[in-house]
Image: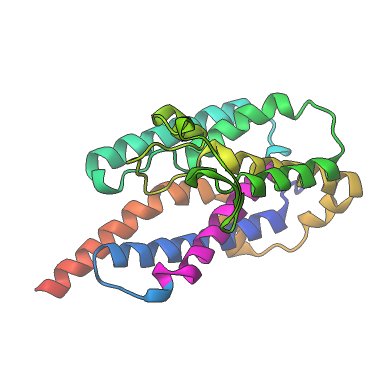
Amino acid sequence: MDTRYHKIDTIRGLCVISMVLYHTLWTLQYFRLFDAGWFRGLPGYIWQQSICQAFILISGFCFGLDRRPIRRGIILSLLGAAITAVTYIFVPRTAIVFGILTLLGASVLIAVPLSRVKLNPLCGFILSLALFMLLKGVNSGYLGCFGVRLAELPQWFYRSIVTAFFGFPPRGFASADYFSLLPWFFLYMGGYYLFRLSVSTGYIACLKNGRVPVVGAIGRNALKIYIVHQPVIFAVVCVLKMIMQL
């Protein structure tokens, strides 16, 4: 019996393809082989946000399908720590501190006890997204989103590497892939409540349709591709730059 939710695999696969294309252009720009104003401006930012927000929302949705969430949370956290260590050693200027795997690992572990709280799925989804939007600006020192500053946050929140994990980075903090617990955890929980909403409405059964073999296979191997794609892109672009300099 086929137990895969093929629509989820397909959506995740499309996100992976988009991510690889985005990081390819980013790496070409890093090595000064590509330069475009749109990529450094708002269109590039929207593209980047569409990828990460879709990934986090889908990950939260899949939390409801995970039979061993604690194990998965620990594995993701360890992988996140490994990526931080490797990037610090090999590319210290663009090291990844509190990247998306660290966020997902922590979100899984926190969601385990929270998922036992009985809350109407629709209310949970709306509340999670509202908190995500409210806290979208915490990294920049305020409550609000899209530049709308509802309230300024105290500067003493932004003290150390520890506060950076929660969403309050100190001055001078830098990371090539920064996803703090706030606000992103609430987007993750929005995905979880979206799963519960799809179960309560019966829509979950429809997600088993729509199989797209190649894209679905990419989606099923999203974590593996995420881990290896950037080193591969860096290696290919380095070779390309060497050839162009000959």
Q: Residue at position x 32%, y 34% from top?
A: 85
Q: Residue at position x 27%, y 39% from top?
A: 88
Classify residue 204 as left or right of residue 215.
right
Residue 178 visible, this angle? yes
Classify residue 69 as left or right of residue 45.
right
- In x, y percent, where is residue 236? 27, 62
Say if 11 sits above or below 85 in the image: below
Say if 137 sits above or below 31 in the image: above
Say if 36 sits above or below 74 in the image: below
- Of 109 and 212, which appears nearest the observer? 109
- Of 217 and 245, which appears nearest the observer? 245
- In x, y percent, where is residue 127? 77, 42
Magenta-drawn stretch, dominant element (helix, strand or loop): helix
Q: Residue furthest left?
A: 246
Q: Quadrant of residue 159?
A: top left
Residue 91 visible, this angle? no
Classify residue 123 as left or right of residue 39.
right
Q: Is residue 51 magenta?
A: yes
- In x, y percent, where is residue 210? 74, 63
- Of 18 and 68, which appears nearest the observer? 18
Q: Is residue 236 magenta?
A: no
- In x, y percent, where is residue 206? 83, 57
Q: Residue at position x 25%, y 47% from top?
A: 93
Mark count = 0
**Coloring scheme of the render?**
rainbow
Classify residue 227 as left or right of residue 238.
right
- Of 104 and 124, which appears nearest the observer? 124
Q: Residue at position x 43%, y 38% from top?
A: 169
The magenta segment: 39-62
Quadrant of the rendering where the C terminus is positioned:
bottom left
